[in-house]
Image: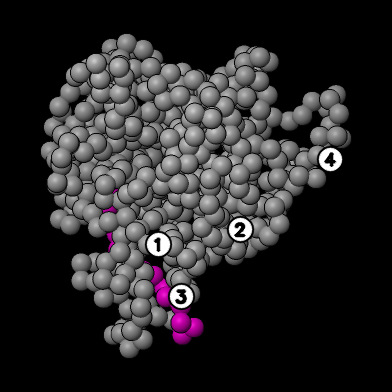
Amino acid sequence: MLQLFWTLLRNGPGLFKVGDTEYNHWFDGMALIHSFTFKDGEVYYRSKFLRSDTFKKNTQANKIVVSEFGTMIYPDPCKNIFSKAFSYLLAAIPDFTDNNLINIIRYGEDYYASSEVNYMNQIDPITLDVIGKMNYRNHIALNLATAHPHYDDEGNTYNMGTALMRFGMPNYVIFKVPVNASDKEHKKPALRKVKQVCNIPFRSTLFPSYFHSFGMTENYIIFVEQPFKLDIVRLATAIFRSVNWASCLKYDKEDITLIHLVDKKTGKAVSTKFYTDALVVFHHINAYEDDGHVVFDMITYKDSNLYEMFYLVNLRKETHEFIETNKVNFSPPICQRFVLPLTVDKDAPNGNVVRLKDTTAKAVMQRDGSLYCLPETIFEGLELPGMNYKFNGKKYRYFYGSRVEWTPHPNKVIGKVDIVTRKYIEWTEEDCYPSEPVFVASPGAVEEDDGVILSSVVSLNPKISPFMLVLNAKTFEVIARASIDASVHMDLHGHFIPTQSTN
């Protein structure tokens, strides 16, 4: 008998102490994979620590022995430090951890726990067991890659990465993995069919832009080269300078932000130079084409202080102390809309060449022919944005997110923004902290917000069990909540698998 079920996979840090050693940053914790399986009106929960090489080394040693983003482990001077130093300098870029704690990526029919380095771990989406470790560099020249790919209507996966000096001239790399790339019968990985779409040279050879995500429309890739930069020399020598990798990221508020527009089919960048003021961006919301323009929305910050919030020493402060210490530096997340004209009327009034009537975003012609982009502010205060992914790359109306406040426990609200009317609704409950909202469309849905919002919720109140929350995506009324008789950690991102079957 054929039985259908749906699974929401989630990923995030779950273990912060090994033996007597402890991580410094929340983004360092060892990955814990969660699955919520929906079947016959019930929800089944399973979780398992990602059995990465990092996990095995740390648990075997009963201490943290592998460096992470905010926690640097220095070599034992008794264990041939000169040999290790030579190998690091020879490689230029250090070998990273495979503690993939950020997201779940689908390539072909393969599912991977991923972070932002060259390593991923393929997992079984049902058992959560590790099938094997994957190195991007065995298939494409990359040192770093995002954990936020895009999937087109056919199911192909697009992603971006960074190729540093070890592979010749440094570049940002856009690549594609076809939907039919997996060969499970012969246990061949989907990445073996990866295709490079294009290269984009660094603006500054030794200071590439950090990026966490990118935008995609039907015909274009949008890459925002921001002045939040990775210092390559500092990264390569971090272990000798006694600094962590997080300190190798620097924000230059005096710089500009370049916006690259790349044709997906030809791999060629649009020749027009688009730029805006200095900003920091982690998450794109959506992008689409409209009457000769590319429109894209993203969550921006005026600085890079968000990462500081998640050092564990900060998260453990009392709320009043935390707010008092950090209120001056708080940079709220702002949803901003940028518009890039594909053709330019040089005689446009006031130099603004944006012709769309439903936005106040501008692109102003400069003397050198470049376009200075002035965004429209849509909403302030939401992060971890999600949407109806059927509208990805298309004109859309709604997005969902988690409220971010400058407190040790920042996510207490799930919100919905109507971009057209600017109406906002939210769900909140005392002492409850929901994860990133995930939209799931109703079967046969026509309207964009016809569906449900899923979010795993944890609480600091020991009387409130963790639960899976199901909201009506139109009204934010509670449809159901499934309590979980287990310890559940706050997660980061995940992947919804719409249909699986068993006999």
Q: Is residue 67 left or right of residue 183?
A: right
Residue type at the position of mark 4: Phe
The reply to whether residue 245 is in sight is: no
Q: CA distance from mark 2 to mark 1?
A: 18 Å
Q: Nearer the viewer, mark 1 or mark 3?
A: 1
Give the residue at x 56% y 62%: 200
Residue type at the position of mark 2: Asn
Quarter of the image for the C terminus: give it.
top left
- The residue carrying mark 4 is 86
Residue 299 appears at what percent x and percent y? Answer: 37, 51
| Residue 44 vertical placement versus 267 (above, below) | above
- Helix, strand or loop under label 3: loop
Work out whether mark 3 precedes mark 2 in sequence or the reverse, and give the earlier one: 2
| Residue 208 vertical placement versus 87 (above, below) | below
The magenta stretch is 367-383
- Helix, strand or loop under label 2: strand
- The residue carrying mark 1 is 220
